[in-house]
Amino acid sequence: MSRQFTVAIAGTGSRGGGTYAPYQKKFPDRMKIVALADPDTARVSLLAKEYGVPAERCFSSAEALLEQPKLADVLVLATQDRQHVAQAVPALRKGYDILLEKPISNDPYAIMELLRTAQETGRAVTVCHVLRYTPFYSHIKRLITEGAIGEPVAIHAAENVGYWHQAHSFVRGNWANSQVQSPMILQKSCHDMDMILWLMGKNCTRVSSYGSLSVFRPDQAPEGAAETCLGGCQCKETCPYDAEKVYITGPQGVASGQTEWPVDVVIPEPTVERVREALKTSPYGRCVYHCGNDVVDHQAVVMEFEDGSTATFTMSAFTTRLAREIKVMGTKGEIIGDMNTNLVTVYPFSGEAVTYNITELAEDFSGHGGGDHRMMSEFFDMMEGKSKGTLTSLDISVQSHLMSLAAEESRLNRGAGVAIRELAERYGSPK
């Protein structure tokens, strides 16, 4: 019989409250939420009622929660990027094992501090690089490991962020400003750096990158654009980023029956009327050309690995689909995969092509293509002693963070190459 672990969740937004908390409903024998923390007290109250958490175990911040004696076996830390390490370090010293939302931090010194603290305390930290746990990427990894295409020589991966997702999260939303949160290549695409590192199976040695903010700027606003979408804007009819289209009438809007992400980020328990009213004052009702954001809307990264293998990665806001695509080129064949269709095709240089429909190989595709719940299950398996670690333990995830930080440093220096080892040593990587 599996052991039930008690869990405290700090950060009850779309990840902490919308993704990790529901694991309890599916696997009540493995997880019980016993404490919650978030400055948004209304959201905390809703979750507390839903999961039966008493009022005395609800806190207005992770810091307030951590002032208490240890309340749970596990702390799910889904707060904002810059808060992670300052909250995780005392949590480790208090005896919590941690499920940590990515990115670890946008501060490389803080990342190394957390790694040292985890090593000193012997506590477990699993970073939520959920793509490794998806049936889609797990199958591609298995094909590579089994030698279906020989030795990987080059990888090309693309993240199609999606025009409205970019507007929601990286223009209007929490991750619009790299000085407040993280550069977009770290916040959004450390997933992809991690995936490329895992599939390649070799250490990355050098990174170069280019990218910019080209569209979501005041000088690109069309004539007649207002400061807010509900403030008399003359461009509503033709603007794809109009807030009413995104959150109410579009396919991901509340009028189409959607009540979860992204509309529940605008306001909890969304209805057409509640969302429309919220957009009048919410950051999500602002014109995308007047948000003061500074993160890129497109970026390309080139990576070199220790044996001379290479990888390229493209991230772009300007896509209709929200999907990842990948091509792995090996000495004996290639693999092409589309996460949107969940189709993976192997093209051997000798033999017939074989296509795998990943939807036929697994049942649960909720949350990052089925990765969220599988990650949590592996984390609890480790806690129970059924495995020695997780696919995304802290020491593993630090590598992909260094790749992302190197990409941003290169981008800011017009594509100058950045050596990963030198970057790690500069920021005090533990020996």
Image (tube, rainbow, N blue to C red):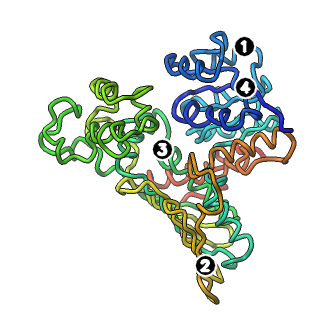
Residue type highlighted by circle 3:
Pro
Tags 2 and 4 touching, CB below 8 Å: no
Residue designated by label 3:
183
Query: Residue 103: where, in percent of width, then height?
Result: 58, 41
Q: Nearer the viewer, mark 2 or mark 1?
A: 2
Residue type highlighted by circle 4:
Ala
Residue designated by label 4:
91
Residue appearing at x 60%, y 67% in the figure: 304
User: Considering the numbered disc 3 on the image, is that residue within a helix, a strand or a loop?
Assistant: loop
Residue appearing at x 63%, y 23% in the figure: 51
The quadrant the N terminus occupies is: top right
User: Considering the numbered disc 2 on the image, is that residue within a helix, a strand or a loop?
Assistant: strand
Tags 4 and 1 touching, CB below 8 Å: no
Question: Which comes before the other along the chain, label 4 or label 1?
Answer: 1
Residue appearing at x 52%, y 68% in the figure: 156
Residue designated by label 1:
68
